[in-house]
Amino acid sequence: MGEKLNISRDSAQFLDKKDPLKKFRERFYFLPNKIYMDGNSLGLLSRDAEESLLRVLQQWKELGIDGWLKADPPWFYLAEYLGGQMAELVGARPEEVIVTASTTVNLHSLVGTFYQPKGIKTKILADELNFPSDIYALESQIRLKGFNPKDNLILVKSLDGRFLREEDIVQMMNEEIALILLPSVLYRSGQLLDIEYLAYRANERGIIIGLDCSHSVGAIPHYFDQWGVDFALWCNYKYMNNGPGGVAALYVNKKHFHLSVALAGWWGYQKDKQFDMSLFFTKAREAGGWQISTPHLLSMAPLVGSLKIFREAGIKRIREKSLQLTNYLIYLIREKGLTEPPYCYHIGSPLKDKQRGGHVAVEHLEAARITRALKERNIIPDFRYPNIIRLAPVALYNTFAEVWAVIQSLKEIIDNGEYLKYDLTPEEVT
């Protein structure tokens, strides 16, 4: 953090004055009189994203169907345009990234393509801490190939329910593994896996490796090409601030462009021949070949504005501030004595920068009720059953003073017994 800090609000305000990204906060809309710490679930709306969405609505109003070719950028090429804009964030070539569909649809499309069981190589290696939707999709793909998930979906175990050990993952990369799918950042604990190391080990064994980067893209620099990742997918409504249900994205390493896709659809057709309306599918030569259906223009449009902010801020500077914010959060919890009785909070995220994503998991036996008490104080966190309060101070719009206020509230909620007035029933959507 640089200078030695005390635990006063003044130190937080001092850090905010020095923040080189503070100007970007003004580009976002905030919930009135609230502190928003849930950007790892749904990012806030920026003025830039609002403007780009309204621009597409205006183009629809003025151009009608001509917007497909006469809008700026043309709707017909918007998925490719956005993929090119996102490529730098993930360390890829522009033609290797496409903005399309939803996360789980892209997962089905990619795993369906890359999971080709043959001989003794019939198994998919994943992990028991992954977001359940990914596991559902993997089980489905194994069944579609005529195999039993009970025998052919291998899940790396966690020793403590929080973290995975890379050496455990590598140990399970045996001759029976046909494909590996891992999260870049674990959605509960915020652990950032050593993807470069894991990809290297998979590559040397000839195993296809893919990533779900939903909890890292927009918060952390990625280097897919350099790391040797075969494919990846992610949503854009978290750190990328593309809006609820915003269109997702995928990456395919160019060495795989020759492959046939598992789920063919007309928007994955070779672009210059798409309207020939041939009954025989000719896949686009780039990552666009993994598209299926006509893009959801009104869901993609906000990303045009959001990416403008990312280009200006730079993903390396975003990561630097994100680490400062999460380090400050952890520092305050420790220095205020909140890990000791009567508070008994536990930091359930890695303490080392290189192992931590963009959020911090604060564990407590009364996490569900404390979450509700925080909301009563106009602080919006995220709860994960049974005992995790996820706090995501986002570099583009959160401040150190807000982090200070959140940690002070965690203390006072225990001091005053505020959580005791709530029952144990968690809210349905967090």
Image: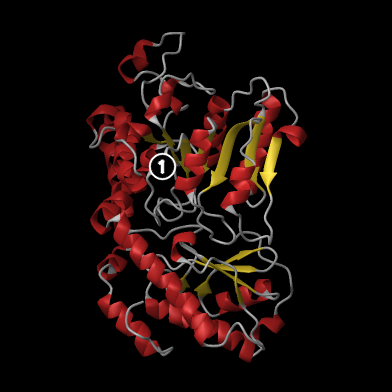
Image position of 269 with respect to 327: above or below: above
Which residue appears at 45% of the width and 13% of the height?
281
In the rendered structure, the answer to whether residue 172 lies left or right of residue 315 reads: right
Q: Is residue 350 left or right of residue 403?
A: right
Residue 228 percent coordinates (x, y) = 42, 37
Q: Nearer the viewer, residue 161 or 396?
A: 161
Q: Nearer the viewer, residue 92 or 388?
A: 92
The crowd level at tag 1 (other Cα within 10 Å; few <14, some 14-19, many 20+) is some
- Residue 331 is situated, as x and y percent measured from the top left of the image, at 47, 79
Q: Nearer the viewer, residue 162 or 121?
A: 121
406 or 188: which is nearer to us? 188
216 shown above or below 109: below
Name the amino acid type tagged 1. Answer: Trp
How many numbered badges does the structure rendering display?
1
- Residue located beneath label 1 in the image: 227
Tell me the residue at 46%/8% (across/down): 279
Left or right side of 345 for 292: left
